[in-house]
Amino acid sequence: MEIWSAAILLFLIIDPVGNAAIILSMLKPVARERRNKVLIRELLIALAIMLLFLYLGQSFLSVMNLKQEAVSVSGAIILFIIAIRMIFPTKDGHIMGELPSGEPMIVPLATPLIAGPSLLAAVMLLAKQEPDRLLDWTLAVLASWFVSACIMMYASQLHSLLGERGLYALERLMGMMLLMLSVQIFLNGIMDYVK
């Protein structure tokens, strides 16, 4: 996989456009002057978690005696579920389920919204498949995180520009793309296991 392909995959999993409405609703109880500071803090925590899983995920897999195929298939299943929720959201519209109230601290913005289980599985899978390319995967993580962070920092402007229907349509489109990617990752995992 190329760096740009990995970055696009990670960007689609983060889904900053689809998460714009969730970010706005999560930050609503926070004082207006603190919102950007809270979001930046959560984005940095998410980046740290992503890099931690990129570099230490292999050790975790070894300790847990998990094979690459198991991570691939389980990651694909999680991606599939998130993609389905993006295409067919629940009544409250939250992809990640029930959200706690108050100022977010690590949960739910940093994780599972930005650095969720499917993203962490994808990052570990990249490191497991080609461990000699950790620098490439670091660049892919940083690129996807940076573009996502820029979009999330302007969530309210994006919401104003696209409107509710525009965000709705864009999230469904990203959900369809993520659904196709999840099926491909699942098939790759099954084929690797059969080999």
Image: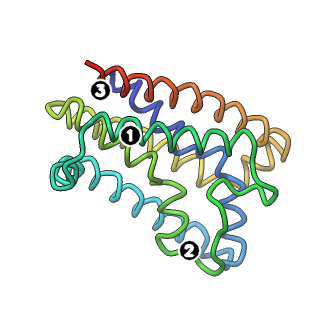
Give residue 172's position: percent from left, percent from top. Answer: 72, 35
**SS label for mark 3:** helix
Residue that label 2 marks = 104
167 or 173: nearer the viewer: 173
Looking at the rendered structure, the kind of residue marked 2 is Pro
Residue that label 1 marks = 122
Earlier in the chain: of badge 3 and badge 2, it is: 2
* Labels 1 & 2 near each other (Cβ < 8 A): no
Give residue 59's position: percent from left, percent from top. Answer: 16, 52
Using the numbered discs, state the Cα–Cα distance from disc 3 to disc 2 in whole angstroms: 40 Å
**SS label for mark 2:** loop
65 versus 76 height, above or below: below
Residue that label 3 marks = 193
72 or 42: nearer the viewer: 72
Looking at the rendered structure, the kind of residue marked 3 is Tyr
* Labels 3 & 1 near each other (Cβ < 8 A): no
Looking at the rendered structure, the kind of residue marked 1 is Ala
70 or 86: nearer the viewer: 70
